[in-house]
Image (cartoon, grey):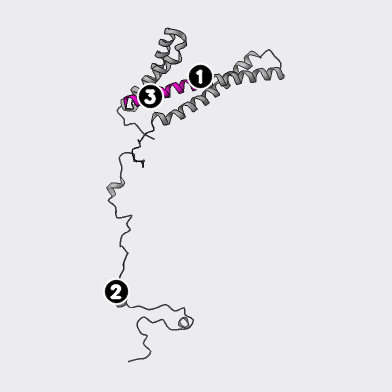
Amino acid sequence: MDNNTPPPGGFKGGLGSIFGGGTPEYSNTELSGVPLTGMSPLSPYLNVDPRYLIQDTDEFILPTGANKTRGRFELAFFTIGGCCITGAAFGTLNGLRMGLSETRDMPWSKPRNVQILNMVTRQGASWANTLGSVALLYSVFGVAIEKARGAEDDLNTVAAGTLTGMVFKSTGGLKGVARGGLIGLAMSGLYALYNNWDHLKGKSPSHY
C-alpha cells in the first residue's frame, strides 16, 4: 500500500495544508451517509395551492367582531370636523368678498383693513358654526337610528337627513319644519342615490 495516498477525510497537500488553509476532501460515499435533517427540496412558501392566491373579493385583516366598513359613530368625527373646516373656508371667502364690496369706496387704510378682517372673521365663524351644527345633528340622528334599528342602510341616511332638516329649521314654525324636512330629504336622497349608482347600473360597487 502506498504511503503517499491521502486518507479519507484528509486535507489537500501543498502550502495550503501547512498554513491551515487547506480544504477537506470528502468522497461521495462519505457524503451519502450524512443525514440532511431540516432540509426540504421545496421552500415552504412555494408549497401552496395557487388557487388560494387568487381572490375575487377584497380581503382585510380585521379584529374579531369588527365590520369591514366604518360605522356612523366612527364617521361622525370626520363628518363634523370636515363640515366645520369647509364652513370656515367658505365663510372666509364670503367675508372677504363682502368686505371688499362694502368698503370699495374707502381708500386703502387701516380702518378698511380692520373692517374687512372683522367681516372675514365673523363670516368664517358663522358658517363653521352652521355647518358644524348640521353635521352634529345628522351624526347624532344617524347613530341613534342605527342603534335603534340594528341595521345600517340607506334608510338610516334618508331618515337622519330628514330629521336634521326639520330640527335645524324648527325655529321657523311649522312651515320652517316642513321646508327643512323637505330639503333634508332631498339632499339625503340624492346622497343615497349617488352611493348606489353603480348598483343601479348593474355594476359591482368598488370599496376602498
Is residue 144 found inside the magenta-colored segment of the image? yes
Residue denoted by label 3: 144
Residue denoted by label 1: 130
Residue under the image location 31 percent in, 76 percent down: 28
For the residue labelled by badge 1, is the local secondary structure a helix, a strand or a loop?
helix
For the residue labelled by badge 3, is the local secondary structure a helix, a strand or a loop?
helix
Residue under the image location 56 percent in, 21 percent down: 125
Closer to the N terminus: mark 3 or mark 2? 2
Mark 1 or 3, closer to the camera: 3
How many neighbours does mark 1 have within 10 angstroms: few (below 14), some (14-19), or many (20 or more)? some
Badge 1 amino acid: Thr
Badge 3 amino acid: Ala
Of residues 182 and 174, the one nearer the viewer is 174
Rounded to the nearest angstrom, the CA distance separating label 3 from label 2 is 74 Å
Residue under the image location 49 percent in, 24 percent down: 83
Q: Please state the extent of the stretch shown in magenta in the rendering.
A: 132-150
Give the percent coordinates (x, y) of residue 82: 49, 27
Is residue 206 found inside the magenta-colored segment of the image? no
Rounded to the nearest angstrom, the CA distance separating label 1 from label 3 is 21 Å
How many neighbours does mark 2 have within 10 angstroms: few (below 14), some (14-19), or many (20 or more)? few
Residue denoted by label 2: 32
- Quadrant in which the C terminus appears: top left
Rounded to the nearest angstrom, the CA distance separating label 1 from label 2 is 84 Å
Give the percent coordinates (x, y) of residue 161: 40, 19
Q: Main secondary structure of the magenta part?
A: helix
